Amino acid sequence: MKRCVWAGDDPLYQKYHDEEWGVPSYNDRHLFEMLILEGAQAGLSWITILKKRENYRKAFDNFEAKKIARYSDRKIEALLQNPGIVRNRLKVNATVTNAKLFLEIQKEQGQFSDYIWRFVGGEPMVNKWKKHEDIPVTTKESDAMSKDLKKRGFKFVGSTICYAYMQAVGMVDDHVMDCFRRT
């Protein structure tokens, strides 16, 4: 079975590639989870975050934005002592900030998915890359998403993070042409 090269030999990575990466998601909780995890990955490898994903779910109340938005300083300090997550103060604080802003978008738009999917016109963009090296790290769509999220006050949402997010939640299908997961 031929996969995208980045899936490598790690069973966790392969499962993520085979079952989740590039699959369109319109579920607000999942969209929020992936936004936080992609931001947590900044400067690290994705496999590091995948291995900590269950710890993140426990530590951050299964990514319930309403709960996270109310985290106290005491809760944040406790998170910074949790070895199961990336203990970076900026990233933990960003999670709380992003939860509040996520809720604002839901209030304004009805659903976060309605807001976020508009950056690709509501439908997945299906690319036709022959090899992994052809896949860009940013696009005009990820630039626009990043710019708008930053304008709203979101943290850890640079264009590269936004493009990885778009791939993760299926807004973009970047499975290479010879990958078995190709749409």
Image: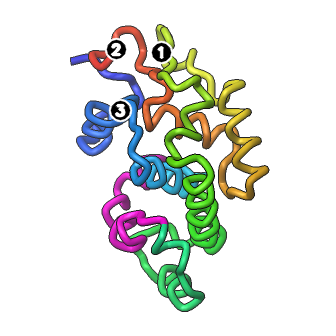
The residue at which mark 2 appears reads as: 183
- Between 61 and 13, the one nearer to me in the picture: 61
> Real-space Cα distance between discs 2 and 3?
17 Å
Label 2: which secondary element: loop
The mark tally for this picture is 3
Is the magenta region chiefly helix, strand or loop?
A: helix
Density class for disc 3 (Cα within 10 Å; few <14, some 14-19, many ≥20) is: some
161 magenta-colored: no
In primary-sequence order, the first of circles 2 and 1 is: 1
Q: Which mark is residue 126?
A: 1
In the rendered view, does 137 fall on the left or right side of 12? right
For label 2, the crowd category at 10 Å Cα-Cα, with few meaning under 14, some 14 to 19 and many 20 or more, is some
Mark closest to the chain's N terminus, 2 or 3? 3
The disc labelled 1 sits on which kind of residue?
Answer: Val
Residue 143: image location, x then y, percent: 72, 33
Asked whether disc 2 touches disc 1, contact meaning CB atoms under 8 Å apart, the reply is yes
Q: Which residue is identified by label 3? A: 7
Residue 139 falls in which quadrant of the image? top right
Circle 3: residue type: Ala
Please tell me whether residue 176 is drawn above or below residue 6 in the rendered image: above
Of tags 3 and 1, the one toward the viewer is 1
State which region is magenta: 45-65
